[in-house]
Image: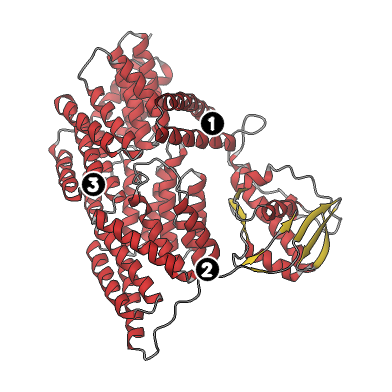
Amino acid sequence: MTGVAETELVDQGRKAASTGDWPRAFDLLAQADQLTRLTVDDLGLLAEAAYAAGHLDVTIGAWERAHAEAVRAGDPVAAADAATRVALHLLMDTALMAPIRGWVKRAERLLEGYHTSPAHAWLALIRSYDRLMLGDLDGALGWATRAIKVGSTCNPAAAAIGRVAEAHAVILAGEVRKGLDLVDEAGVATISGELDATSTGMLYCELVCMLQGLGQLDLAEEWTEAMERWSHGSAIGSTHGRCRVHRAEILRLRGATAEAEQEALAACAELRPYLRREFGWPLTELGRIRLQSGDLHGAEEAFLSAREAGWDPEPGLALVRLAQGDVALAVASIRDALDHPRTVPSKELPPNTHLRRAPLLAARVKIDVAAGDLVSAREAADELAAVAASFQSRALLAGAAMADGQVRLAAGDPAGARQAFETAAQLWSLVGARHEVALARTGLAQAQREARSDVPARAAPPSPMNTPRVDAQPNPNVLRREGDYWSLSFEGHTVALRDLKGLHYLGRLLAHPGREFHVLDLVAGGVAPPANSPGASDPELTSSGWGDSGLLLDAQAKTAYRRRLVEMDEDIEDARLLSDSGRLVQAEAERDFLIRELSRAVGLNGTRRAGSASERARVSVTRAVRYAMSRIRQHDPALGTHLDRAIRTGIYCVYLPDTRITVTWIT
């Protein structure tokens, strides 16, 4: 039974929501929720206030409870509406499609016998995004058309965002001009006053995300500025954090890296989504900013964190390796990213089409030129030019011209390079990307210097990719444990070292050259306690001062993760029955992601502290490996130098010997 105090809290919460005071509305309704059992309508209001105040986990939980209450009350329409809202928020802020499909099916079953309702419009929109992220453009367009048709009669917000989905599918299909006209049509709803604040923020966000993903950076900036004027500093859920990411990108393009980094860091603080994968988006932008400003360590840290969150940070990591001077690792990274694209479903990224390859191709040109592999660089530049021609965005065309100039300059064609760099500078100037303009002008100046030079055209440097492999030694090298000692043989020189934990890690890395090991995998590899002599203690064992920053996942989050796993299993089974291979691959990848997240967060006793997870493991493994390498260097300087060049530590550790020689290990 609801008392007077609880009723007053709910009434005050409604009033605060009606005036747009979302934080107060959320606090009041959350208090009421602790004291009494809210009705379906009040749970919906709590969900809306929570989203506007930036509490996505509460939003989804409230809609799930509203669904259960409506089912209990025998109200299928209200239950379907709540189920649809769960799916919609999961879509907008996590893009984990397998659980989304489960909620869609639940809503559709409840709506059997009903033909037109707001839920029908939202369901069609969700179906459209589902097909879009799978690359099914025809299916996406068909569902978007249905969302517009149904929404026009009963749900203006679904109709407006449906037009964004329609424009997205049309542009990806190659009809760029028609798609951009549809963007303008969709944008009318933001100024018409027909949408509520949450829907308006969602529409702005979808417009900007779509344009950014399509490479229409100048248009994305215009809509970002319009969104900022609309919001007047008032956050609507994660919209404010998403605005910050786009703002950070714009500032980066302008060359204002200090301001851009502040925006990106603020976005990271605000975008704490219910499930962690989408958090990789602001982290990746932070990495780009730091790379542009020359902060290689900070850039690497941000990109690795993004990858740990389930995001694809490439080509950022490959470009960091290039900037660090490790050309071989940069080549391996960018080629792996192109040959084995990660299937990360997200509205922030285009689906796995040629468009998604564009930034990877631009990076490959730069890296291959540095490696002297001009054949590969030319192939990448030509593919990038074809992508740019298809989508006709100034940013893509500028990037293609820049790549062409880089290859021509390296191949000894300064006249052709000069023309390409001039085109790139003009197009980047129209986009407003000052940093890229400066890079294009630097290339132009270099081409002009070479054109004035009397020195004959340079022959293309030999490509490491085409250089014959030369064995560094006739016999394989050895890193093998023998009791309390390790035997190390490198280039005919053999030494023995007392057991160290770092040698166990090195042994595993050397046994699998080129394979990246997460530090938690190395730590969990079953390393026996080292038998160190009294005077040679292993500093990795000193754990004092590591601290503890709390649980990685609280009980509520772990329960939600496990619930999503059940929903994913159902979607995987449906995909198999329907022989939908694209959906099956996506669902299985999502399930693997969630299992990894739970594995990170749950230790042997059912919990794992944040301070003892990846960051502590990274510090521990790095210390152990570096200490072992320092001991090796004391006894075998040549092997120490080789390991310094070939071992990379961090959240992921890898052994990458020079590709031009053969280094074989027996472990």
Q: Which residue is mark 2?
A: 466
Mark 2 vs mark 1: give the one in front: 2
**SS type, badge 2:** loop
Quarter occupied by residue 662: bottom right
* Amino acid under disc 2: Asn
Q: Residue 171, labelled with which disc?
A: 3
Answer above or below: position of 319 versus 237: below
Residue 391 percent coordinates (x, y) = 25, 53
Circle 3 packing at 10 Å, graded few (<14), some (14-19), many (20+), is: many
| Callout 1 crowding tier (Cα within 10 Å): few <14, some 14–19, many ≥20 | few
Q: Which residue is mark 1?
A: 554
Marking on residue 666: none
In the picture, measured across the screen, residue 74 lies left or right of residue 475, that is left
Q: How far apart in space, not on screen, are marks 2 and 1 (Cα)?
A: 52 Å
Kind of element beneath mark 1:
loop
Residue type pointed to by label 3: Ile
N-terminal-most mark, 1 or 3: 3
Q: Residues within 10 Å of mark 2 (few under 14, many from 20)?
A: few
Mark closer to the chain start, 2 or 1: 2
Secondary element at tag 3: helix
User: Where in the figure is residue 7, as x and y percent of width and height?
Assistant: 32, 16
The residue at the point 50 percent across, 33 percent down is: 591
| 98 horizontally vs 232: left or right | right
